[in-house]
Amino acid sequence: MASKNVETLRAAHESWNKRDFAGVVSNAVKGLAYTDHGRNITLNTRDKFKEWTEGWAKAFSDGRITKPQYIDAGDIVVAQFTTEGTNDGLFGSMKPTGRKMSLPFCEICHFDKQGRMISGGCYYDQYTLLTQLGHIQPLAVAA
């Protein structure tokens, strides 16, 4: 049986898939500290984190978290999943390309004794993402 913290993170991911952004942050503290390591963005409140999750959904309106796996480490949960979607909205300052992406993510979240997320961060390959979206060209491989 999965721990309360695993279930909290799983519910947040399911909420994102349903575009229930209030549900994404419902079990996070107001002072949540979260880092998007791929874009080197640090969010220092629950509201900023919510805006960040909404930004991903605006950039990929059909985006989904798929194939999640959760590792329970007590007050820390490690999640590995794939995010898939079509870039049909602004992604930061980049215009939509209409191209699809499928990208592995690793997310590490820390919970307090009440089961609320207090900090976290995600890791993904920004180069692969920008290549899939057509914003940069793949490097030529020498033969």
Image: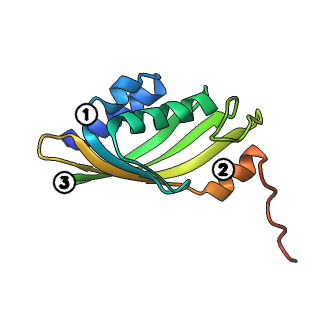
Residue 74, label in figure: 3
Spatial CA span between label 3 and label 1: 16 Å
Quarter the C terminus occupies: bottom right
Can residue 2 be seen?
A: no
At horizontal 54% and vertical 55% (from top left) the residue drawn is 38
Q: Residue 120's spot in the image, x, y percent?
A: 34, 51
Q: Name the kind of residue labelled 3 in the image.
A: Gly
Whichever of labels 1 and 2 marks the residue nearer the N terminus, that label is 1
At horizontal 33% and vertical 37% (from top left) the residue drawn is 46
Residue 73, label in figure: none
Whichever of labels 3 and 1 marks the residue nearer the N terminus, that label is 1
Circle 2 sits in a helix, a strand or a loop, which is it?
helix
Residue beneath disc 1: 27
Camera-side mark, 3 or 1: 1
Decide: is 117 above or below 139: above
Whichever of labels 3 and 2 marks the residue nearer the N terminus, that label is 3
Can residue 133 be seen?
A: yes
Circle 3 sits in a helix, a strand or a loop, which is it?
loop
Spatial CA span between label 3 and label 2: 31 Å
Circle 1 sits in a helix, a strand or a loop, which is it?
loop
Residue beneath disc 2: 129
Q: Name the kind of residue labelled 2 in the image.
A: Leu
Q: Residue 112's spot in the image, x, y percent?
A: 17, 47
